[in-house]
Image (tube, helix red, strand yellow):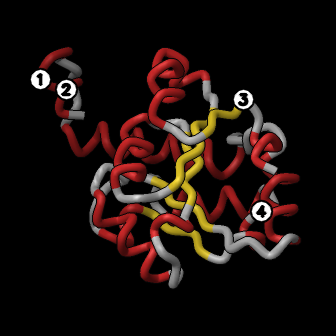
């Protein structure tokens, strides 16, 4: 929002831009955002096989929870965390240490499946196993993501 005001001379306040962006995002989470292909089948199968499942997202609960419930996926996760719950980001190694502790699991027994190179790099450095997941938004980073992750998948069902 500051960038829009300072660099692009948008005639709105930072607060007004943030409010509009949040309203747009909330609408998308509530009505239009879909799960990645095979995400539902994959998480249901992992849960059926007894694997603990969790989500860690930068999105706030007000957005992610409503989306997961609309998609019928909320109940398949043992934990749904927003970075807000930890007051940090997915690029802070401490978040992975805290999650390992909450889940009573050694870091080496935890797995992050993500499409973000920074989150994957941090989780790997924290001792987690990592799965790079293809997404159009990170296609430019695919080569680098493949180098730093334990495996790379183009479709979440490949995890199974």
- Alpha-carbon distance for marks 2 and 4? 35 Å
Question: Which is nearer the eye, 82 or 126?
Answer: 126
Disc number at residue 73? 4
Residue mark closest to the camera, 4 vs 1 = 4
Q: Name the residue under label 2.
A: 3
Residue mark closest to the camera, 3 vs 4 = 3
Left or right: 140 in relation to 156: left
Question: Which is nearer the eye, 114 or 128?
Answer: 128
Residue drawn where x is 41% and y is 49% of the image: 124
Rendered position, 135 above or below 122: above
Disc number at residue 154? 3
Asked if the residues shown at circle 2 and circle 1 are in contact, with their CB atoms under 8 angstroms apart, the answer is: yes
Number of callouts in the render? Answer: 4
Quick one: label 4 or label 1, which is nearer the N terminus?
1
Quick one: label 1 or label 3, which is nearer the N terminus?
1
Left or right: 51 in relation to 124: right
Left or right: 21 in relation to 54: left
Mark 3: secondary structure? loop
Picture coordinates of residue 62, whole percent (x, y): 52, 63
Question: Which is nearer the eye, 73 or 28?
Answer: 73
Quick one: label 2 or label 4, which is nearer the N terminus?
2
Residue drawn where x is 82% and y is 53% of the image: 42
Mark 4: secondary structure? loop
Mark 1: secondary structure? helix
Residue mark closest to the camera, 2 vs 3 = 3
Q: Tell me the crowding category of disc 2: few under 14, some 14 to 19, or many 20 or more residues within 10 angstroms, Cα based.
A: few
């Amino acid at each position: 929002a500051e960038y829009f005001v300072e660099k692009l001379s948008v005639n709105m306040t930072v607060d007004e831009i943030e409010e509009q962006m949040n309203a747009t995002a909330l609408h998308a989470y509530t009505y239009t955002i879909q799960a990645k292909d095979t995400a539902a089948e994959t998480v249901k199968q992992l849960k059926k096989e007894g694997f603990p499942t969790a989500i860690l997202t930068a999105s706030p609960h007000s957005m992610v929870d409503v989306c997961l419930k609309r998609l019928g996926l909320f109940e398949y996760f043992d934990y749904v965390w927003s970075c807000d719950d930890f007051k940090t980001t997915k690029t802070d190694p401490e978040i992975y240490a805290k999650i390992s502790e909450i889940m009573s699991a050694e870091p080496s027994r935890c797995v992050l499946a993500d499409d973000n190179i920074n989150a994957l790099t941090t989780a790997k450095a924290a001792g987690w196993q990592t799965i790079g997941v293809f997404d159009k938004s990170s296609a430019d980073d695919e080569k680098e993501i493949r180098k730093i992750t334990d495996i790379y998948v183009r479709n979440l069902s490949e995890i199974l």
